[in-house]
Image (tube, grey):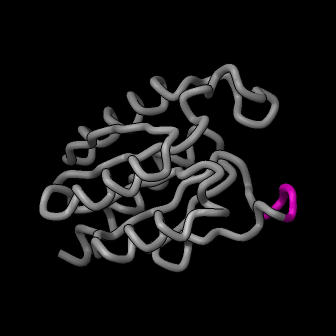
Amino acid sequence: MKILLINGANLNMLGQREPEKYGSTTLSDIEQSVIERGKVLGVEVDVWQSNHEGEIVDKIQSARGIYDGILINAGGYTHTSVVIRDAISAVKIPTVEIHMTNIHAREEFRHTSLLSGVCIAQVVGFKELSYVLALEGLVGFLKKNS
């Protein structure tokens, strides 16, 4: 089983960016913890990050036939990107949306996710643990539905 972890805009700044909200853990640390947890669960996890919306769309589209599931933290694109939503919908790969903070308890413009309607689940508010929880949920879903 193969899982693709996609991180969007500004997530490459984790560890430096607003540590009071996001903590001091770097994206590399988070990716490594997801890869390691994947090994325990018996799945291969590939990680990828881009600050560019079109590149994220291209990556999602290229996942067809390669990945069994997608984990995505689209960052701010969560609230603005119809094209990322459409890409997730088009590839028909079970996808879990991830947020380190509770987007529903933040600024009002962050309360709406354009992605959640085409994802199988959303994990929010557990900082870096959100990623591992999302992986575990996705793997459980895929095993149950395979």
Picture layout, residue 101 above or below residue 87: above
Q: Which residue is drawn at the image coordinates 61% and 26% (left, top)?
A: 13
Q: Furthest-front residue in view?
A: 54
Image coordinates of residue 96 in percent, x first then y, are 45, 63
Q: Which residue is drawn at the image coordinates 60% and 55% (left, top)?
A: 77
In front of the other: 31 or 12: 12
Main SS of the magenta segment? helix
Image coordinates of residue 35 in percent, x first then y, are 32, 35
In front of the other: 36 or 95: 95
Residue 46: name its quadrant.
top left
Q: What quarter of the picture does the N terminus occupy?
A: bottom left
Image coordinates of residue 32 in percent, x first then y, are 38, 28
Image coordinates of residue 80 in percent, x first then y, are 64, 63
Q: What quarter of the picture does the C terminus occupy?
A: bottom left
Picture layout, residue 64 above or below residue 89: above
Q: Furthest-right residue in view?
A: 107
| Residue 13 shown left or right of residue 112 in the figure | left
| Residue 130 shown left or right of residue 90 in the figure | right
Q: Which residue is drawn at the image coordinates 38% and 76% (left, top)?
A: 89
Span colored in magenta: 104-108
* Number of marks: 0
| Residue 36 shown left or right of residue 22 in the figure | left
